[in-house]
Image (cartoon, grey):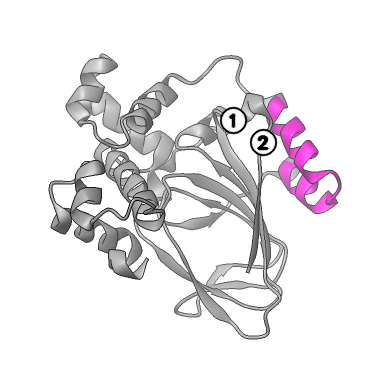
Amino acid sequence: MAYREYTPHPALQNYIDAYWTTSTDQYDATLHRILPDSCTDIIFNKGAVIYDAGHQTRMATGQSYLVDTMKTYIDILQNPGVSTIGIRFKPGGISAFYKLNLNEVTDLAVPYQDKQLYDIIYRDKDLIASLDSYFLNKCPSSSLPFLSIIADIKIKKGQIKVSELIDRHAMSERKLERLFKEHTGISAIGMIRLERFTVALHHIKANHANRTLSEIACLSGYYDQAHLCNDVKSFTGMSPAQL
């Protein structure tokens, strides 16, 4: 599978992580495991039907989908002729451009239509510049307050408590949870856990210092090696040694 990422305009980078494309030209269908990353995507399927591991249609040809925050992995069957284009929004970032309640679409790929965006994708000319122009025109004049909460989680690399977020942003736990469910589809503790896992995954895959799993667990904010291994298994379906 060929995968490419494109960096959005600097003024969009608080909200959009990347534009990306995938394509396959292999002759045999292969399974591809997608891991959770705390982001939300809008995906356009321009090629062959995409199936899940159970051979159920995940994304039909010529359709666009909203894929919200994933809480665990999913296996996708990559057939010859797959061609997708996606916009990956940072956690909460899609709320800068669309009025959505993501609470009901966590872990799902649901049909989603934006005719203007659809026309840009299928015009297939100066794609990145056209996407930048489209989202710049929709970009809010000031940053979303919710993103400062997400920033705290990112800065702390998932090593922060919900009670600290409540204190730092002067809001009730009920309001905090409502904001997280609305803007990300998952709870505050769920986002913290995802961020901590993401940090640990980076350390496991790029272990240039040859750290032990116990050292990585401590560095990433886990209680111990077993706690780390349980989270890795939950999010990826694999042990750290299999990653």
First along the sequence among labels 1 and 2: 2
How many discs mark residues in the rendered view? 2
Is residue 120 something that shows in the picture?
Answer: yes
Q: Position of residue 11 (x, y in %)?
A: 64, 24
Disc 2 marks a residue whose amino acid type is Pro
Which contiguous range is marked in magenta? 117-136
Image vertical order of residue 146 relative to residue 20, above or below = above
| Numbered disc 1: secondary structure | loop
Q: Is residue 98 magenta?
A: no
Q: Which residue is mark 2?
A: 8
In this rendering, position of residue 208 left or right of residue 160: right
Residue 226 image point, x, y percent: 14, 58
Per the image, label 2 sits on a secondary structure element best described as loop
Question: Residue at point 46% right, 34% down?
Answer: 92
Residue contact at pointers 1 and 2, CB within 8 angstroms: yes
Q: What secondary structure is the magenta-colored segment mainly? A: helix
Q: Is residue 6 above or below residue 65?
A: above
Q: Is residue 238 visible?
A: no
Q: Residue at x 13, y 46 (%)?
A: 223
Q: Which label belongs to residue 13?
A: 1
Q: State the residue at coordinates (29%, 37%).
A: 158
What amino acid is labelled 1 in the image? Answer: Gln
Quadrant, the C terminus: bottom left
